[in-house]
Image (tube, helix red, strand yellow):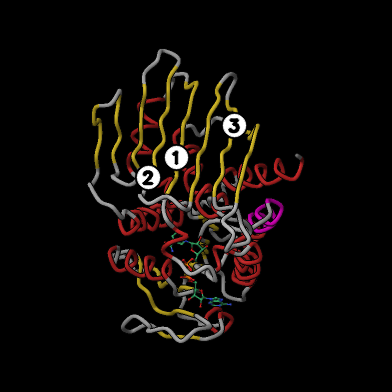
């Protein structure tokens, strides 16, 4: 039997714990051996715990690193992980970094070092995305309507890092827009998306945008609209694709379902929180990339979000 890949997680907050759960579910492939967090956190059973991520990087028992800290730390920590004396594959949470040039630099470094660098976009991993990609292959999509609405402002204290530009790199667009656009791009991998009009507003208690309306174009004649809201009482995460012959294919991300002209065409589980279902799929994909020795440094979702921010500045 093949030896499991020993993983060290940097940043053991909400997302780090989702990673630990996923690693446990894929126990024949991965094993969690260490975590690093600046806060005192309860380490999962058997895992070594470090307060400085550089100590984790010096641990010879760690084969792969998962970076689950705030977005503004991803670049520095990924760079350190790729440059460390021990050659290791590295997974980075979304948004991978906050500048496209940094993605390129990290991708080139991984190539030079011969290690796998994997940018995790969990929403693009859900099975309805792959099912929609198959259904729409070879057909012309002319319209997209994407909604991402929840009550993040009600759930979290205004001090949370996601409400600060310095730590998150933006607001609802950077934190959630990247998720929904990674799913859109997962369905139409060949298309290039360009924001054409952007309107944002902010709740008074925080310094980032909490609502956004984005028009975008794609392909030769496609147009789409993205609506995002962090002050909505319910969870709605939905993408509707309209083909040139008028058919609609809709992904309901919250329920994990795919509808074709309103009828359920595919469902993987009816759940209100599919994050714990998404992360084993992320780790399976990471394992597949490791087996093929192939990086996944897809910058398209980040590029689109940065283009929307540039559009706001241009106004
Ligand atoms: N929370 C989610 O549901 C979720 C889902 C998908 C992706 N993500 C992504 O995961 C990342 C982390 O988000 P989160 O929600 O887990 O945040 P969080 O605040 O819950 O956890 C972040 C953790 O990083 C630790 N940390 C901060 N600085 C550190 C350092 N220098 N070294 C080591 N640890 C450090 C913090 O103490 C904290 O425990 C973000 O990029 C986010 O976009 C989060």
Q: Nearer the viewer, residue 294 or 148?
A: 148
Q: Secondary structure at mark 1?
A: strand
Q: Return the disc, 1 or 2, that comes first in the chain's sequence.
A: 1
The magenta segment is: 100-108
Q: Nearer the viewer, residue 65 or 149?
A: 149
Instruction: Please tell me how crowded label 3 is: few (under 14), some (14-19), or many (20+) other residues with Cα within 10 Å.
Output: many
User: In the image, is the residue at mark 3 within 8 Å of ligand 1 by its beta carbon?
Assistant: no
**Disc number for residue 198:** none
Q: Secondary structure at mark 3?
A: strand
Q: Is residue 9 left or right of residue 54?
A: left
Q: Secondary structure at mark 2?
A: strand
**Disc number for residue 147:** 1
What residue does disc 2 label? Answer: 236
Please identify the residue farthest to the top as the structure is shown. 245
Disc 1/disc 3 C-alpha distance (Å): 14 Å
Q: Position of residue 65 (x, y in %)?
A: 49, 69
Circle 1 or circle 3, nearest the eye: 1
- Residue 103 in magenta? yes
Q: In which image quadrant can residue 20 be found?
A: bottom left
What residue does disc 3 label? Answer: 216
């Amino acid at each position: 039997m093949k030896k499991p890949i020993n993983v060290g997680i940097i940043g053991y907050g909400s997302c780090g714990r989702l990673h630990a759960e996923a690693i446990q579910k894929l126990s024949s492939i991965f094993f969690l051996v260490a975590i690093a967090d600046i806060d005192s956190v309860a380490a999962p059973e058997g895992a070594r715990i470090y307060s400085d991520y550089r100590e984790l990087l010096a641990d010879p028992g760690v084969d792969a690193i998962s970076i689950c800290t705030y977005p503004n730390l991803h670049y520095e920590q990924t760079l350190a992980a790729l440059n460390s004396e021990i050659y290791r594959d590295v997974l980075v949470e979304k948004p991978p970094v906050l500048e496209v040039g940094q993605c390129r630099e990290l991708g080139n470094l991984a190539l030079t070092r011969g290690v796998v660098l994997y940018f995790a976009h969990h929403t693009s991993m859900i099975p309805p995305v792959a099912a929609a990609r198959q259904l729409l292959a070879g057909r012309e999509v002319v319209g997209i309507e994407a909604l991402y609405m929840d009550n993040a402002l009600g759930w979290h204290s205004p001090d949370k890092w996601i409400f600060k530009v310095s730590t998150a790199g933006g607001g609802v667009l950077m934190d959630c827009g990247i998720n929904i656009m990674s799913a859109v791009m997962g369905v139409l991998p060949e298309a290039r998306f360009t924001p054409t009009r952007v309107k944002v507003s902010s709740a008074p208690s925080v310094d980032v945008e909490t609502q956004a309306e984005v028009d975008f174009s794609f392909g030769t004649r496609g147009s789409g609209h993205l609506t995002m809201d962090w002050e909505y009482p319910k969870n709605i995460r939905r993408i509707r694709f309209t083909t040139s012959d008028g058919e609609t294919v809709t992904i309901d991300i919250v329920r994990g379902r795919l509808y074709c002209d309103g009828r359920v065409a595919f469902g993987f589980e009816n759940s209100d929180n599919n994050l714990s279902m998404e992360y084993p799929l992320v780790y399976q994909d990471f394992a597949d990339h490791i087996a093929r020795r192939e990086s996944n440094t897809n910058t398209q979702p980040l590029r689109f979000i940065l283009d929307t921010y540039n559009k706001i500045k241009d106004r």
